[in-house]
């Protein structure tokens, strides 16, 4: 079989694929999800309840996070992990030191 080389191939004969927008893909993916549907219905109910009380509901663009609390929790987890590691290592280290101290070749005998 004879295959065309790069010079023989038709470079002008290309094809294009229509790629839908990301929002459309996400909407298509999530439209049959019951949990998301229930959550959306719950949000709509809360909005209606707030509107009935005279409050205006507005979505925030920025998520409010407690970074200090997250960093403190991470630091505490790291400290706990280090304590556990050193607690498991320390007895073995002390045994090694005691063996070296008890070894007769490391003793100094005074006359």
Image (spheres, rainbow, N blue to C red):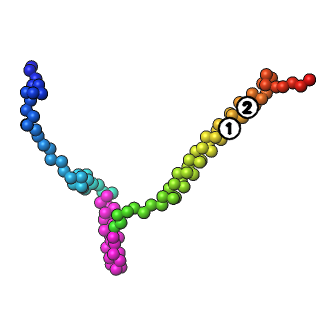
Spot the residue most to the top: 1
Q: Is residue 14 left or right of residue 71?
A: left
* Residue depicted at x 31% and y 58%: 36
Q: Is residue 102 left or right of residue 53?
A: right
Inspect the magenta stretch and tell me whether residue 48 lies in it. yes
- SS class of the residue under badge 1? helix
* Residue depicted at x 24% and y 52%: 22
Looking at the image, can residue 28 be seen? no
**Between 101 and 42, the one nearer to me in the picture:** 101
Which of the two discs, 2 and 1, labels the residue nearer the N terminus?
1
Provide residue 73's location: percent of width, then percent of height. 54, 54
* Residue depicted at x 65% and y 37%: 89
**Between 83 and 34, the one nearer to me in the picture:** 83
Looking at the image, can residue 51 be seen? yes
**Between 76 and 47, the one nearer to me in the picture:** 76
Counting the numbered discs, the total is: 2
Quarter of the image where one finds residue 10? top left
Asked if 76 appears above or below 45 in the picture, the reply is above
Provide residue 63's location: percent of width, then percent of height. 39, 61
Spot the residue most to the right: 111
Provide residue 61's location: percent of width, then percent of height. 34, 64
Mark 2 and mark 1: span between their CA atoms? 11 Å
**Badge 1: residue crowd in 10 Å (few <14, some 14–19, many ≥20):** few
- SS class of the residue under badge 2? helix
Spot the residue most to the bottom: 54
Question: Magenta segment range?
Answer: 36-58
Q: Is residue 14 left or right of residue 41?
A: left
The N terminus - image quarter: top left
Q: Which numbered disc covers residue 90?
A: 1
Circle 2 residue: 97
Examine the residues drawn in magenta and state their main secondary structure. Answer: helix
* Residue depicted at x 54% and y 55%: 72
């Amino acid at each position: 079989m004879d295959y065309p080389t790069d010079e023989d191939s038709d470079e002008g004969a290309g094809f294009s694929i229509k790629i839908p927008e990301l929002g459309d893909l996400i909407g298509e993916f999530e439209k049959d999800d019951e949990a998301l549907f229930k959550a959306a219905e719950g949000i709509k109910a809360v909005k209606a309840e707030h509107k009935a009380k005279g409050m205006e509901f507005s979505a925030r663009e920025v998520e409010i996070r407690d970074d200090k609390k997250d960093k403190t929790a991470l630091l505490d987890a790291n400290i706990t992990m280090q304590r556990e590691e050193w607690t498991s290592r320390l007895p073995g280290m002390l045994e090694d030191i005691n063996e070296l101290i008890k070894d007769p070749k490391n003793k100094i005998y005074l006359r």
